[in-house]
Image (spheres, helix red, strand yellow):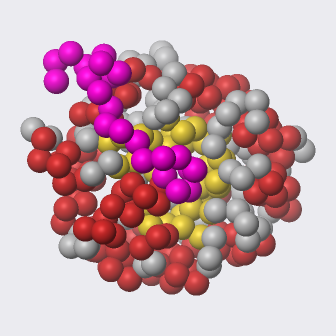
Amino acid sequence: MLSGVRKQVHDVIDFHCHPPGWRRTRTAYWRAPSPRDYLRYLRRAGLRGAALLAHDGLHRATPDSNDDLAAFAAEHPDRFFGFGTVYAPHPHAAAEARRCLTDLGLRGIKLHPWLQGVPMHHAGLDAVLAVVAELRGIVLVHDGTPPYATAGQIAAAARRHPTLPVVLGHGGLHDTWREALALTATTPNLYLCLCGTPPYAARTIVRQAPPEKVLFGTDAGLAPGPAQEYAVARVREISDWGVADADRVRILSANPARLLGIDPLPPITAEEAGDHDH
Ligand SMILES: [Zn+2]
């Protein structure tokens, strides 16, 4: 079913995924996928790697939510790139960000100003952003839901930390995508991930944004089960964007690899994913 998609999308690194919210779902209605299940999902969707962003931690940013995420990502360290989270007003937030990027081997920090109730100008946030910049990590911020998490608020934080790559996690969604596009073009360290961005906006963004500043993501991991039709549908959409082939390779593969500081990833093999049926 997906063979055509695999051919179209090259070596895709999905820059916006979530591991299963396993602390919250362990006793809930669906069985959380294992790291191997998740790798199999990536393989079947034609993906090669995934930025795995905090999930449980967005609701309750505790160190053990970061421990869980790091343990999940460490099962397939060449494929999963973990992003922890912190609650910026907490006095230990910067220290926890440092622990994430050093002891836990995570690649960055995900922030969700709206769910976490922390505006991008909160005094505690600059110490966190400074630590991530110092350790050459990445900050990905949920965006597109005013009044918190507008592209303008996030771009202002990015400008205070010009060496820190800051990613708009949703390309502005419906409400702020024009602002997201304009600010990505004018803020050197601001990037834009197309994830949940409405297709009409995504088409304009890929035509007008600097091609080296655009990433692609699916929000995979939020739906029950690892083989998520929603995420697969997002992968399919890529071919409808009408973007030149060279730019598509940048968005799907070269840009995420450059930000993560990795070489292009080889395909996930059936053996690696324990995928004996496909
Ligand atoms: Zn998300």
- The image quadrant that residue 35 belongs to is top left
Of the pair 5 and 263, the residue shown nearer to us: 263
Instruction: State yes or no: residue 209 in magenta.
Output: no
Give the overall secondary structure of the magenta segment: loop
Hey, which quadrant is residue 270 in on the image? Answer: top left
Q: Position of residue 123 (x, y in %)?
A: 86, 62
- Compared to residue 175, the image places residue 268 above or below, namely above
Left or right of 88, for residue 255: left
Where does the magenta region start and end? 257-278
Please give the name of the residue rendered at 64% of the width and 55% of the height, measured from the top-left corner: 139
Q: Nearer the viewer, residue 121 or 218?
A: 218
Q: Is 203 on the left or on the right of 210, as rendered? A: left
Percent coordinates x, y for residue 263 in the rendering: 48, 47
At x 52%, y 81%, the residue is 185
Q: Which residue occupies the foreground of this view, 211 or 218?
A: 211
213 is higher (above) or lower (below) than 60: below
Tell me: 73 left or right of 63. Answer: left
Residue 260, magenta (yes or no): yes
Query: Residue 145: x and y, percent?
Result: 52, 65
The percent coordinates of residue 36 (x first, y second) are 39, 20
